[in-house]
Amino acid sequence: MKASRIQSALGLLFRPRASTSIVTPGLRAQARWAHKDAQPPQVPATIPFVPDVETFLTLIGRGLKQHAPKFPTWEALFSLTSDQLRELGLEPPRTRRYLLRWRQRFRDGRFGIGGDLKHVENGSADLKVLEIAKDPLTRVRHIVNVPPGKKVEEVPPEELVRVHGFKVQGIRTIVGPYVLPAKNGGARLTVTEGMWEDRRGHKIDGGERRQAEVRFKRRVAERKALREKQGFY
């Protein structure tokens, strides 16, 4: 992608708008200033698991990580319009729509796995099993996020962060998507490309529009092959 296209898109974002007038025979049209009460796009705060642009694009997948250098700041990522994203070279259109959907989900606080973590270092987080005795015969196990290298007993209760999307198997084995056993017990969750990706469906027999035609031709070919096998030509 040429640098001039990137500068052009970013220039559209930060360029001040001005009122212009166009005079035509019998008609005078004047462009309006943006409404004084219009709010700029909301730029959400980063979270421990998503501290920068590259991590966000890595998590949502679909190859968007390759476009990370085109966004100089977190604010630019959440402020550029669809037209400006096209100027940056985000093609095809479904890629832009996908990014816009995930931007809004992030604004709404609808994160993927790991979005509720608090203690993250270099894209990785430690998960431990916390046991709580409800009564002498009943013990409840929760999965919590602890600071790197710490045991549950070493962390004050207010610093323990309960996480979702995982479960305890057996006594202290943590299972769930993208987690790996840790050497010091518990498990570790690390940022992985496509971890939050919405998987696209696969077309079968040519997709919805051509499906009937493709299947009809297949049945005709199968009947013809059967007749030839039976000696009818």
Image (cartoon, rainbow, N blue to C red):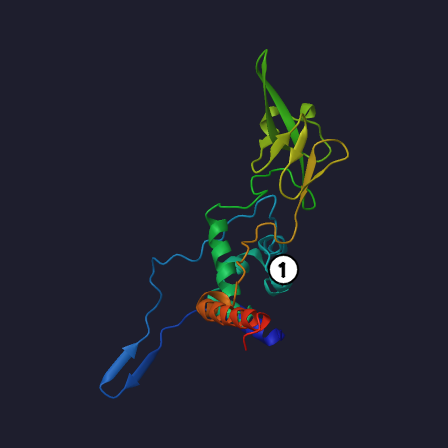
Q: Residue at x 60, y 65 (%)?
A: 70
Relative to 102, is 16 above or below? below
Q: In the picture, residue 67 is in which quadrant? A: bottom right
Residue 186: give x, y in percent of width and height.
70, 32
> Which residue is more in the foreground, 200 or 194?
200
Q: Is residue 53 above or below residue 185?
A: below
View extreme (bottom): residue? 25
Q: Residue furthest front?
A: 231
Label 1 residue SS: helix
Picture quadrant of residue 212: bottom left
Quarter of the image where the C terminus is located: bottom right
**Compared to 136, does 129 lie above or below?**
below
Residue type (three-letter) at the residue carrying disc 1: Lys
Q: Is residue 15 visible?
A: no
Q: Looking at this view, name the residue that lies furthest to the top.
A: 136
Extreme right residue here? 183
Work out whether residue 220 can be spotted: yes
Q: Residue at x 65, y 48 (%)?
A: 191
Q: Which quadrant would residue 134 be assigned to in this image?
A: top right
Q: Quadrant of the N terminus?
A: bottom right
State the image coordinates of residue 222 (x, y, percent, origin top left).
54, 69
Number of other residues with Cα within 10 Å of mark 1, as a class: few under 14, some 14 to 19, many 20 or more:
some
Give the residue displayed 47% in from the left and 56% down from the top.
Answer: 101
Is residue 145 toward the left or the right of residue 112 in the image? right
- What residue sits 61% from the left and 45% below the top? 49
Residue 4 vs residue 217, the one in the foreground:
217
| Whole-percent x, y for residue 106 in the image | 50, 50
Q: Which residue is mark 1?
A: 65
Q: Residue 98: horizontal and vertical position, in percent?
A: 50, 60
Q: How many marks?
A: 1
